[in-house]
């Protein structure tokens, strides 16, 4: 009896030791193997592709997760599941949270309304728009996503911009950029922006941090994002929109400073126009149209000093003057629709709009784009 007990104990001890050894081997093998797990996706295969890149404040209510793995982000997007048809004219939209559609259902974003316009090119190709907007204002963040988006054979890029995306100190100010330092460094080097934007220092990760156990949170987020595909496909809900949306600030500060800049003009090297030029080089020969996006214009306290929470009037006016001059000198197409939408159509910030305001913006852009398509050779 004792011999049997000893044999059984010895057996389970060997099993435990072997299991522990296998765990350590698999755990640290993960650190040495560049496993592109983000490219493995249930979206566009078992589940419908998503209409916009994954971002969420409340994952359990929005059936969505904020992930910064670029492979996983694009693998889930409808772009990855839509091979380009010979009869399609493909347009990518890049920009900030207003382009992404913050506080808007997936079917009421700018891209959704643009697709309802059912535009066609002179040779009868159907114009189809895709949403590559993403929250946080940074031109470099937009260019990072554009770099990925160019792999999907666009015919045109619409880039929605605003002054808040232009300060040099904002260019690396995004979790998406912070979590992808290697890709950001390669992009900065590729576009020769080293003197304009100091490349982020990639932190030295330990072997343990690169191991399977060290990457458990990123892997868990990726897995949870895949599983939310069931609910996304069934509901097309990808954002939890509160019943009562906080209102934008109407009464404003009298502060005239803008990121350390003072009137009457912004400094000559303050705005990151070299990033815009780099984006044009990156996309060439695919055209880019700049769209200076609509914003809320307050009539409250100190509205004679500031347009809204973001902008002193002098700074925004100087930015618009510089933008027009920049585009004219380089022969670029730029649509300045900053004051197109009435103040009541803005929600919690100076750039987020109601469905009605978004639809109006889409109608204006569609009209301008149709004219551009029929007059540009």
Image: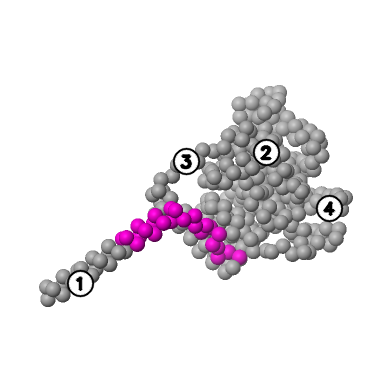
> Tag 2 or tag 3, which sits nearer the N-term?
3
Residues at marks 1 and 3, CA–CA distance in whole angstroms: 48 Å
Q: How many marks?
A: 4
| Residue at numbered disc 1 | 8
Pointer 2 and pointer 4: residues touching (CB < 8 Å)?
no
Q: How packed is label 3: few (under 14 Cα within 10 Å), some, or many (20 or more)?
A: few
Residue 45 image point, x, y percent: 59, 68
| Residue at numbered disc 3 | 203
> Tag 4 or tag 2, which sits nearer the N-term?
2
Q: Is residue 65 visible?
A: yes
SS at mark 1 in the image:
helix
Pointer 3 and pointer 2: residues touching (CB < 8 Å)?
no
Residue 361 image point, x, y percent: 74, 49
Quadrant where the N terminus is found in the figure: bottom left
SS at mark 4 in the image:
helix
| Residue at numbered disc 2 | 275
Query: Given this view, does label 1 or label 4 mark the residue nearer the observer?
Result: 1
Write the start and end of the magenta stretch as one range.
20-44
Residue at 72% in and 47% down: 283
> Tag 1 or tag 2, which sits nearer the N-term?
1
Name the residue nearer the viewer: 235 or 155: 155
| Residue at numbered disc 4 | 373
Residue 198 image point, x, y percent: 58, 34
> Tag 4 or tag 1, which sits nearer the N-term?
1
Name the residue nearer the viewer: 138 or 341: 138
Name the residue nearer the viewer: 108 or 288: 288
């Amino acid at each position: 009896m004792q011999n049997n007990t000893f044999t059984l104990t010895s057996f389970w001890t060997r099993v435990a030791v072997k299991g522990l050894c296998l765990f350590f081997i698999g755990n640290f093998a993960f650190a040495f193997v560049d496993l592109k797990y983000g490219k493995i996706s249930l979206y566009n295969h078992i589940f419908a592709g998503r209409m916009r890149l994954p971002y969420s404040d409340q994952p359990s209510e929005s059936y969505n997760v904020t992930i910064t793995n670029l492979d996983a982000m694009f693998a889930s997007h409808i772009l990855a599941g839509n091979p380009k048809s010979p009869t399609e004219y493909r347009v990518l939209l890049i920009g900030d949270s207003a382009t992404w559609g913050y506080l808007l259902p997936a079917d009421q974003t700018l891209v959704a309304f643009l697709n309802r316009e059912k535009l066609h090119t002179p040779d009868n190709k159907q114009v189809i728009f895709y949403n590559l907007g993403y929250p946080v204002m940074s031109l470099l963040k937009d260019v990072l996503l554009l770099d990925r988006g160019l792999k999907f054979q666009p015919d045109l890029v619409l880039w929605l911009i605003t002054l808040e995306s232009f300060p040099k100190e904002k260019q690396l100010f995004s979790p998406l950029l912070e979590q992808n330092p290697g890709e950001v460094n390669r992009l900065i080097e590729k576009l020769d922006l080293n003197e304009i934007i100091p490349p982020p220092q990639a932190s030295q990760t330990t072997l343990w941090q690169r191991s399977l156990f060290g990457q458990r949170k990123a892997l868990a987020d990726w897995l949870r994002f895949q599983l939310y595909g069931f609910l996304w496909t069934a509901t097309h809900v990808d954002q939890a929109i509160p019943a009562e949306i906080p209102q934008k600030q109407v009464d404003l500060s009298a502060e005239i400073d803008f990121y350390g800049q003072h009137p009457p003009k912004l400094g000559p090297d303050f705005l990151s126009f070299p990033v815009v030029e780099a984006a044009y080089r990156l996309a060439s020969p695919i055209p880019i149209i700049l769209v200076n996006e609509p914003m809320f214009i307050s009539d409250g306290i100190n509205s004679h000093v500031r347009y809204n929470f973001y902008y002193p009037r002098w700074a925004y006016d100087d930015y618009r003057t510089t933008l027009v001059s920049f585009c004219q000198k380089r022969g670029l197409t730029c649509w300045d629709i900053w004051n197109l939408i009435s103040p009541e159509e803005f929600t919690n910030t100076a750039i987020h709009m109601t469905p009605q305001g978004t639809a109006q913006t889409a109608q204006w852009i569609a009209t301008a784009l149709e004219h551009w398509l029929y007059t540009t050779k």
